[in-house]
Amino acid sequence: MELILKQDVENLGFKDDVVTVKNGYGRNFLIPQGQAILATISAKKVLAENVKQRAYKEKKIIDDANIIAEALKALEIKITAKAGAGDRLFGSISNIDLAAAIEREGHSIDKKFIIVTGGHVKRLGKYNASIRLHREVTVDLPFEVIAQAN
């Protein structure tokens, strides 16, 4: 079944992508949730026209995302956490904590666009995260987890 996505769907595609999915997934989940529409011939023509009109606006959005990416690359993020013996943390550091640390530096990034490499961080040390600012602009952000001073 061919569908046109109306919004970004994780592990499937981005808004306005034409994707092929199994009939049940499309009919029972994507279409009722309002995340996709059937990719008929007329819908594809409308989509092509909309994409053409949006190309100019898209360029400005990508340029803005690149400016934010350069600003993020210049940041040195250090997250403090309580640690026990052997550099193990009490709890873990996730994309939520990283989003809060970036917010303190003056940049607002939604936590769902941040992926910490390797999942949750459970030890002190240096780690990387990937931040998706746009479908074409992603930034690798190194950060460090340090022990909280008593």
Image (cartoon, rainbow, N blue to C red):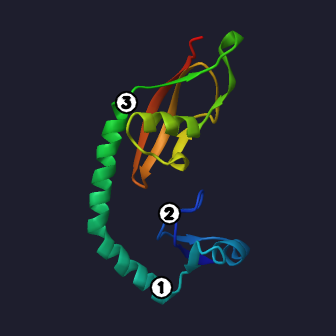
Q: Earlier in the sequence, mark 1 or mark 2?
A: 2
2 or 3: mark nearer the eye:
3
Tell me the distance, in whole angstroms, between the alpha carbons under discs 2 and 3: 28 Å
Q: Which residue: 60% across, 57% down? A: 11
3 or 1: mark nearer the eye:
3
Q: Which residue: 33% across, 30% down? A: 74
**Does residue 18 lie above or below 38 as drawn?**
above
Q: Which residue: 69% across, 78% down? A: 27
Badge 2: few (under 14), some or many (20 or more) residues near its Cα, within 10 Å? some
Which image quarter: residue 103? top left
Tell me the distance, in whole angstroms, between the alpha carbons under discs 1 and 2: 17 Å
The quarter in which the C terminus is drawn is top right
Element at label 2 = loop
Q: Which residue is mark 3?
A: 75
Viewed as shown, does residue 48 lie left or right of 100? Answer: left
Amino acid of disc 1: Ala
Amino acid of disc 3: Leu
Amino acid of disc 2: Phe
**Does residue 84 lie above or below 55 as drawn?**
above
The tag on residue 14 is 2
Q: Position of residue 94 (x, y in %)?
A: 60, 36
The extreme bottom residue here reads 42
Q: Which residue is mark 1?
A: 43
Q: Which residue: 57% across, 16% down? A: 148
Q: Position of residue 48 (x, y in %)?
A: 38, 78
From the viewer's side, name the closer residue of 19 and 56: 56
Element at label 1 = helix
Q: Earlier in the sequence, mark 2 or mark 3?
A: 2
Tell me whether the residue at label 2 lies in contact with that at label 3, contact meaning CB atoms closer than 8 angstroms. no
